[in-house]
Image (cartoon, helix red, strand yellow):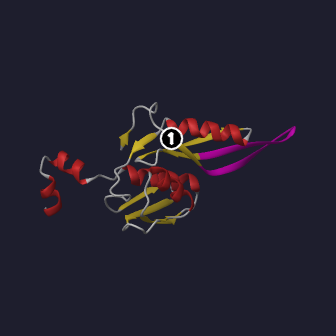
Amino acid sequence: MNKVKTTNDLELKDRLVAVNRVTKVTKGGRTFSFSAIVVVGNEDGIVGWGLGKASEVTAAIAKGTEAAKKNLIKVPLLNGTIPHEQFAKFGGAQVFIKPASHGTGVKAGGAMRAVLESVGITDVLAKSKGSSNPHNLVKATIVALGELRDAYTVSQNRGVSIDKVFNG
């Protein structure tokens, strides 16, 4: 995964994926707290996720946003889509993302859609298998995006020309 070092010069937009109310039963009654999973991205190849927990929803979202800014990765984009197909798992969630032609749009559901749109992908086909838990779906999608490589990176790693990568 390509970790991003600095966040100072980035214009990051945050998206709330899910808010969960957690109840703790004590001798004095019930105590409610909230956990929020947030995705941030600059819609140009950089994305991150964070989990915030607090006794108020707004505080949980703010904490999640701060955590997401510390956890950014760089994703290779190719004309608004991804360079190749990718499958990834995290916990019980399994995701499959596939490049799509221009004009297709983001064919993904819920938590995956928030991550893919935050990266800046405009055309992609995505399928979620297994668990639909938003926490694991976001993490599996980030893992899949982190494993993507473009042709230029592959040619540099192998020490060959880009033509040889395509024509094999």
Task: Locate residue 10 relative to residue 109 in the image: left or right.
Answer: left
Task: Locate residue 165 relative to residue 25 in the image: left or right.
Answer: left
Q: What secondary structure is the stretch in magenta mostly built from?
A: strand
Percent position (x, y) of residue 94? 46, 61
**Residue 86 versus residue 74: which sits nearer the camera?**
74
In the image, residue 131 lies in the stretch drawn in magenta: no
Vertical side of 50 occupied by 79: above or below = below
Name the image quarter holding the N terminus: top left
User: For the residue marked with disc 1, what is the amino acid?
Assistant: Leu
Residue, x 56% and y 52% (percent of image)?
135
As drawn, the residue found furthest toward the front would be 103
In the image, residue 25 lies in the stretch drawn in magenta: yes
Q: State the image quarter where residue 2 is shown.
A: top left
Residue, x 49% and y 35% (percent of image)?
70
Residue occupied by mark 1: 12
Vertical side of 114 occupied by 6: above or below = above
Q: Which residues are magenta?
A: 16-37
As drawn, the residue found furthest toward the right would be 28
